[in-house]
């Protein structure tokens, strides 16, 4: 299984990073997790053909995680894609996606490929054994009442990704490390939101879980000047097991010899 961190910015627009997106490659599968602004260009920059994606999974509907989706679909259409594309979204949000895309004249039957917006319950394990299991987190908890008043569910999810070789947790945006700690404790890799979790907490978690590698993404501007020092700290304190993502970074996980 290979991960390509195509967009590693936080919710703050910056020049040198694009908003949240990453690709999971496993066998013939190429799954895009989140489609933040600029994700089509981010994929191209990483050498990934837009039409090669086999599924899109959206963790929640904050703009920095979803606003690149219509342009991604347009890019696939213009690239001549014909394969159907499933788009997996949080429960309660299917109709909103359909309405949003419809408003941009993104009509499935007009385009060269059909796409289906479906809620998470429909993500089947692949023949090669790739499983993607979203689980709810507390990222939007504080917004629950206000969102309800606007008739929108406060739905935000992290993902547990597993295959025959390994187990990975992608936090996407979280309220705190507690949201993913139990799932990450037994995993090989945690890809974590470093805009909502402090660096000391990330290092303490790495120290407490000796087999875990942590990849920090969703990098906020305020930690940017200290990244070199954080990388050095990782080498000194946890054997380099805390990594800091940049756009286009790849991470390969292979089956371990027992
Ligand atoms: Zn968010």
Image (cartoon, rainbow, N blue to C red):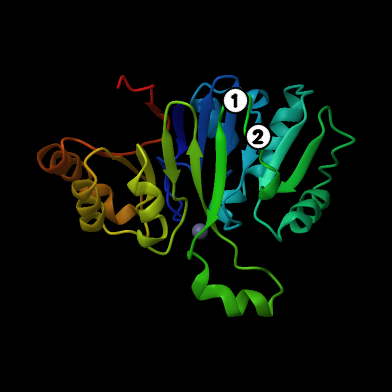
Answer left or right for 158 relative to 100.
left
Where residue 80 appears, as percent x and y from the top left, is 77, 21
Where residue 171 appears, as percent x and y from the top left, is 44, 50
State the SS at label 1.
strand
State the SS at label 2.
strand
Of residues 8 and 199, the one nearer the viewer is: 199
Establish if 181 lies above or below 107.
below
**Most extreme residue toward the left, as rendered?**
236
Does the beta carbon of the residue at mark 1 sit less than 8 Å from ligand 1?
no
Which residue: 68% across, 49% down? 121
Which residue: 42% across, 39% down? 168
How far apart marks 1 and 2 lie (CA) works out to 8 Å
Report crowding for label 1: few under 14, some 14 to 19, many 20 or more residues within 10 A (C-alpha): some
Where residue 257 appears, as percent x and y from the top left, is 31, 19
- Which labelled disc corresponds to residue 160? none
Sequence-earlier tag: 1 or 2: 1
Answer left or right for 206 relative to 120.
left
Tell me the residue that label 1 is attached to. Answer: 29
Tell me the residue that label 2 is attached to. Answer: 55
Labelled pair 1, 2 in contact (Cβ < 8 Å): yes
Q: Can see residue 106? A: yes
Which residue: 71% across, 73% down? 151
Of residues 238 and 233, the one nearer the viewer is: 238
Determine the image quadrant of residue 174.
Answer: bottom left
Where residue 211 appears, as percent x and y from the top left, is 25, 37
């Amino acid at each position: 299984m290979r991960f390509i961190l195509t967009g590693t910015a936080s919710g703050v627009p910056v020049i040198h990073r694009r908003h949240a997106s990453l690709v999971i490659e496993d066998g013939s599968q190429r799954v895009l997790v989140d489609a933040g602004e600029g994700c089509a260009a981010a994929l191209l920059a990483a050498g990934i053909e837009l039409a090669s994606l086999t599924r899109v999974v959206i963790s929640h509907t904050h703009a920095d995680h979803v606003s690149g989706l219509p342009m991604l679909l347009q890019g696939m259409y213009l690239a001549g894609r014909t394969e159907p594309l499933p788009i997996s979204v949080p429960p309660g949000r299917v109709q909103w996606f359909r309405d949003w895309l419809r408003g941009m004249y993104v009509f499935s039957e007009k385009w060269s490929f059909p796409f289906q917006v479906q809620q998470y319950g429909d993500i089947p394990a692949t023949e090669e054994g790739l499983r993607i299991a979203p689980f709810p987190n507390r990222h939007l908890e504080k917004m629950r009442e206000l969102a309800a008043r606007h008739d929108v569910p406060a739905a935000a999810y992290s993902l547990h990704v597993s295959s025959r070789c390994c187990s990975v947790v992608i936090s996407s945006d979280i309220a705190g490390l507690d949201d993913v700690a139990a799932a990450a404790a037994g995993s090989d890799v945690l890809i974590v939101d470093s805009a909502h979790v402090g660096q000391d907490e990330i290092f303490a978690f790495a120290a407490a879980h000796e087999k875990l590698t942590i990849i920090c993404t969703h990098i906020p501007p305020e930690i940017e000047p200290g990244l070199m020092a954080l990388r050095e700290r990782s080498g000194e304190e946890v054997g380099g097991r805390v990594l800091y993502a940049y756009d286009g970074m790849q991470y390969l996980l292979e089956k371990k010899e027992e």
